[in-house]
Image (spheres, rainbow, N blue to C red):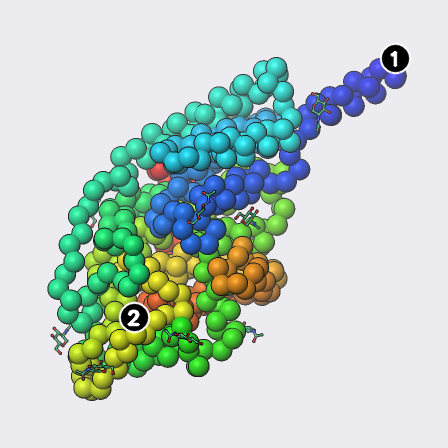
Amino acid sequence: MKFSSVFLTLSATVASAQYSGDIVQYWVDQSGLLSNNSLIGGLQSPPSGWFEAVVQAAIYVAALESKNESLAFQQLAVTHAAHDSLTWTFHGTRNFGNLFKSAQDIVAAINISESDDRYWRAAAIGRRAAVRVTNARQDDKLNNFVNYVYRPAIPGVYQRTPGSPFVAPDTPQARYLRTFGGIGNVTKFRAPPPPSVNSTEYEAILNYVKSVGDRNSTVRTPNNTETAYFWRESSPIQWNRFAHNVIGNKFAKDVQSSAKFYAQLNYAHANAAIAGWDSKAYYNSWRPVTAIRRTDIWLPSKRNVSNPTWTPLLDPTPNHQEYISTHATFGGAAAAVITAWNGGKDEINIVQSTNGTGAGLGVLSRRYTSIKQAVKDNGDSRVYGGIHFQFSSDVGSVVGGQIGRATLEAFDKNWDKF
Ligand SMILES: *[C@@H]1O[C@H](CO)[C@@H](O)[C@H](O)[C@H]1NC(C)=O
Ligand SMILES: *[C@@H]1O[C@H](CO)[C@@H](O)[C@H](O)[C@H]1NC(C)=O
Ligand SMILES: *[C@@H]1O[C@H](CO)[C@@H](O)[C@H](O)[C@H]1NC(C)=O
Ligand SMILES: *[C@@H]1O[C@H](CO)[C@@H](O)[C@H](O)[C@H]1NC(C)=O
Ligand SMILES: *[C@@H]1O[C@H](CO)[C@@H](O)[C@H](O)[C@H]1NC(C)=O
Ligand SMILES: *[C@@H]1O[C@H](CO)[C@@H](O)[C@H](O)[C@H]1NC(C)=O
Ligand SMILES: *[C@@H]1O[C@H](CO)[C@@H](O)[C@H](O)[C@H]1NC(C)=O
Ligand SMILES: *[C@@H]1O[C@H](CO)[C@@H](O)[C@H](O)[C@H]1NC(C)=O
Ligand SMILES: *[C@@H]1O[C@H](CO)[C@@H](O)[C@H](O)[C@H]1NC(C)=O
């Protein structure tokens, strides 16, 4: 009978309802929120960047393993991969309940019932993907104890920053982590040496950040101040959201492409963090606040540039070495991947918004028409914030670009080198 066949078709459609958005973006967002790192606090680099690379790797495996199935099935497989790998990365925290809710909310939208055998097949694919990736990362050295001993406080050498609650610079083991996606030994991405603290060039560099990065600077424009706060957020979270804005909803029905894009982006972030920490540990450079507060005269000009009460806009200065800016390195790496997926074009037209600024400025929004401009502003933001020298941001952005491109080049062959 005609009527019953129409009815059957309808009920089949309803039964295979699916989530209407991009499932990979959903889990990228949940990862950021669950890490409680949307501004400052939560995870520091490199666990930020690192944990998202682990999760996106598991998601990519699940997407490949489920690619012949329906969209809803793929979404469910990805959800299980994301849940299980996130649980592993957050082990030892109290995040289980929030994570459970993130999964439960999206499982309801995907709407494959647990009485349907597809539910359990998809779950098994997701679980296997998470196990595969997290097993591979068991011995990646993130958990290793690496000692840090302060070096004598001569000009140029890192010292504990004022207001830092930590005894040593965070995660000194980070430089030894295995990179993602087979880009090889991270020391090939080590930055060239910074300008010598005894060079005449250095005095101008120091005076620049001293004036522009001072908490009460009269040189920094309101727009510069806004730039410092706009780009203050955790880099992987900010750049993942930037990526959403560029790509939009284009891959909502193409889970595999979305998973590939975000795996590349988050591998690049993680690799950028590891490389950034390699340069930081190798050069062990002081922060502007340490240089400016020093009361002896160490510059070749014999001019006294000291201000013992100088305070940067973004106070307190992060508790790790200055050179290079990992913030800038993340930006350069993200831009390389995003540009590749933007057809190789720099031109974009997006409105990027912050998720809070911590400065009573609320949510800030900016239109960006160039990816390069975003990279530049992101790097400069740390100088306006008084926590980095300009050369650290400039070199960091360049090194990040090299890492992003290396991650892209290696990906098709080495994506499963977790
Ligand atoms: C979920 O699927 C069931 C049938 O399996 C259907 O009755 C229900 O309306 C669907 N819910 C949604 C939100 O699509
Ligand atoms: C998130 O982190 C902030 C500061 O680091 C803390 O005050 C807040 O309680 C945390 N929120 C959750 C839900 O853990
Ligand atoms: C998907 O289908 C193709 C063609 O039938 C097959 O070669 C491939 O192995 C299948 N992949 C998976 C993961 O099932
Ligand atoms: C990477 O290269 C550096 C410098 O050449 C070397 O000291 C280090 O052992 C290498 N690391 C690995 C994991 O091969
Ligand atoms: C900045 O200016 C405010 C007054 O506008 C003052 O209270 C504060 O002490 C100044 N901070 C520094 C570090 O000079
Ligand atoms: C603020 O500065 C950015 C570059 O840092 C620039 O693109 C933007 O146009 C400036 N906005 C205003 C209102 O001047
Ligand atoms: C340099 O200037 C600062 C701030 O005025 C002062 O505290 C310090 O003693 C001076 N250093 C020397 C060596 O004169
Ligand atoms: C810079 O000069 C000081 C003496 O003013 C010296 O102690 C220090 O070793 C020099 N640093 C470098 C990196 O040359
Ligand atoms: C901003 O962060 C809050 C949690 O602090 C979250 O609830 C909200 O969804 C976030 N917004 C975006 C756009 O990420």
Kind of residue indicated by mark 1: Met
Q: CA distance from mark 2 to mark 1?
A: 80 Å
Kind of residue indicated by mark 2: Pro
User: Along the horizontal axis of the image, is 327 left or right of 202?
Assistant: right
User: Along the horizontal axis of the image, is 212 left or right of 167?
Assistant: right
User: Along the horizontal axis of the image, is 210 left or right of 102?
Assistant: left
Q: Residue 157's x, y, as percent? A: 19, 66
User: In which quadrant is the C terminus drawn?
Assistant: top left
Q: Residue under circle 1? A: 1
Residue 45 versus residue 355: which sits nearer the camera? 355
Which residue sits at x=21%, y=63%? 159
Q: Residue 9's x, y, as percent? A: 78, 21
Q: Residue under circle 2? A: 288
| Disc 2 element | helix
User: Is residue 407 something that shows in the picture?
Assistant: no
Between marks 2 and 1 in the image, the one whose residue lies nearer the viewer:
2
User: Is residue 370 something that shows in the picture?
Assistant: yes
Which residue sits at x=28%, y=41%? 142
Q: Residue 120's x, y, as percent? A: 54, 18
Label 2 neighbourhood size at 10 Å, few (<14), some (14-19), many (20+)? many
Q: Residue 61's x, y, as percent? A: 46, 32
